Amino acid sequence: NFPQSVQDCDGWMMTGSKHGVYENLPWMLTLQALVRDIHTAGLPMAGICFGHQLIAEALGGKVEKSSKGWGVGLHDYSLTPQAPDWMQTKSGGFTLNAMHQDQISRLPEGTRVVASSAFCEYAALLYGDSIITFQGHPEFSTDYETDLLELRQLTGIPEERATLALQRLNQEGASEDGAVVSKWVVDFFHQHSPSGYEKW
């Protein structure tokens, strides 16, 4: 069920999906309309993976199946000069687990690219001061990604790419920055909370 009003929530999160944005299923079109209404209202919104892509498509961008194929396992992203001060890290970047074969191929007008990689040019985006999105999954631990990759290896992910990803995931000390990125998202919502941190 879709909300009756964008004011039903103080902030919004668009999450992952097994579907591709370009499938244009009826519920996706309804969700894209909701995204546009949220954006017009200036309410805070975050998008992860499919959510990252759907928000871009809804606001004038384009999403396609990437010629680079599947992005899986641990991916390293570099922060760009457009990244705000509150997104800085000592290394100048961050690592997240990825699980996607679709990518944003054209940005909506006025979007800031705040993180990028050789594999995923538009890895993290800011839309004004009200929307933040990430292609990677801050909610995926290395254990979860390993299990998911082993499962999905049987359903279309090329064996060579899956094997390389699993090798890195299984290395001693393999880690991701999901907690760091999650805090960025939480802090982003806090910036828009009318009653401060206590409300969250």
Image (cartoon, rainbow, N blue to C red):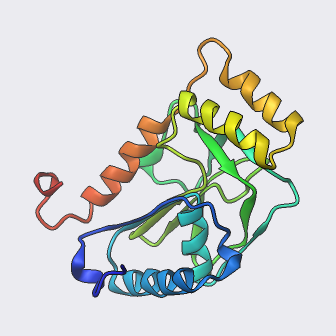
Closest to the observer, 23 or 130: 23
Residue 58: x percent and y percent? 57, 82
- Is residue 17 depicted above or below 147 in this figure? below
Q: Is residue 188 left or right of residue 96?
A: left
Q: Quadrant of the N terminus?
A: bottom left
Q: How many marks?
A: 0
Q: Residue at (66%, 48%) from the top-left corner?
A: 99
Which quarter of the picture shows residue 26?
bottom right
Closest to the observer, 170 or 154: 154
- Is residue 189 depicted above or below 106 in this figure? above
Residue 10: x percent and y percent? 23, 70
Q: Residue at (42%, 36%) from the top-left corner?
A: 179
Q: Is residue 147 left or right of residue 22?
A: left
Residue 196: x percent and y percent? 14, 58
Residue 11: x percent and y percent? 30, 68
Closest to the observer, 43 or 18: 18
Closest to the observer, 97 or 160: 160
Q: Is residue 75 in sight in this rendering?
A: no
Q: Is residue 38 left or right of residue 176?
A: left
> For the view shown, which residue lies furthest in the top direction?
172
Q: Residue at (82%, 61%) from the top-left corner?
A: 66
Q: Residue at (78%, 41%) from the top-left corner?
A: 154
Q: Is residue 32 in sight in this rendering?
A: yes
Q: Quadrant of the C terminus?
A: bottom left
- Is residue 112 depicted above or below 186 in this figure? below
